[in-house]
Image (cartoon, helix red, strand yellow):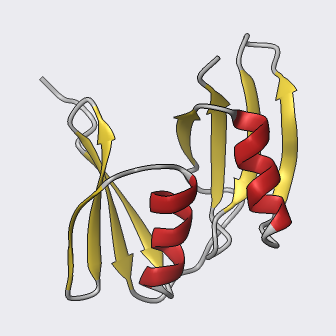
């Protein structure tokens, strides 16, 4: 059976990425060291932050995370200087979602746990 196991995010600054994915989104750090950090995203999925050259693109893959308190998460990110591409809004497919850029400029979709 094929299933999604890990999402790898390239980052120019591991501490900065940990602030976004760990502190803001609340993903627990399972392991860290040697320019890598593994965060637990639930259901056996992990997010691997890999400190290396990064080239974000609006036409590549964007990860989506379910978050509690979508409006608050986006407001805290914006207040700290984070880029918000699309503010929280109801989507035609039934989700309430926002799109932000992580510290390296990667698109990240945030879906309300609602």
Q: What residue is drawn where x is 28% and y is 86%?
A: 35
Q: Where is residue 81 in the image (x, y as percent from the top left)?
A: 82, 73
> Hey, which residue is sitting farthest top in the picture?
94
Q: Position of residue 30 (x, y in %)?
A: 21, 58
Q: Is residue 10 left or right of residue 98?
A: left
Q: In which quarter of the image is residue 29?
A: bottom left
Quick one: quadrant of the C terminus? top right
Q: Is residue 54 left or right of residue 56?
A: left
Of 5 and 90, the residue lying toward us? 90
Relative to 100, is 104 above or below?
below
Relative to 24, is 112 above or below?
above
Q: What residue is drawn where x is 73% and y is 13%?
A: 93
Quick one: quadrant of the N terminus? top left
Q: How many marks?
A: 0
Q: What residue is drawn where x is 84% and y is 64%?
A: 79
Q: Position of residue 20 (x, y in %)?
A: 56, 64
Q: What residue is drawn where x is 79% and y is 37%?
A: 71
> Hey, which residue is sitting farthest left in the picture?
1
Q: Where is residue 112 in the image (x, y as percent from the top left)?
A: 66, 26
Q: Is residue 29 left or right of residue 77?
A: left
């Amino acid at each position: 059976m094929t299933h999604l196991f890990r999402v790898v995010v390239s980052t120019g600054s591991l501490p900065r990425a940990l602030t976004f994915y760990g502190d803001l989104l609340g993903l627990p750090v399972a392991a860290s060291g040697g320019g890598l950090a593994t965060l637990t995203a639930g259901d056996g999925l992990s997010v691997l932050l890999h400190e290396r050259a990064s080239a974000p693109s609006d036409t590549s893959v964007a990860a989506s995370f379910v978050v509690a308190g979508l409006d608050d998460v986006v407001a805290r990110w914006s207040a700290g200087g984070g880029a918000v591409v699309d503010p929280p809004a109801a989507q035609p497919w039934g989700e309430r979602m926002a799109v932000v850029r992580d510290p390296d400029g990667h698109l990240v979709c945030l879906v309300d746990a609602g």
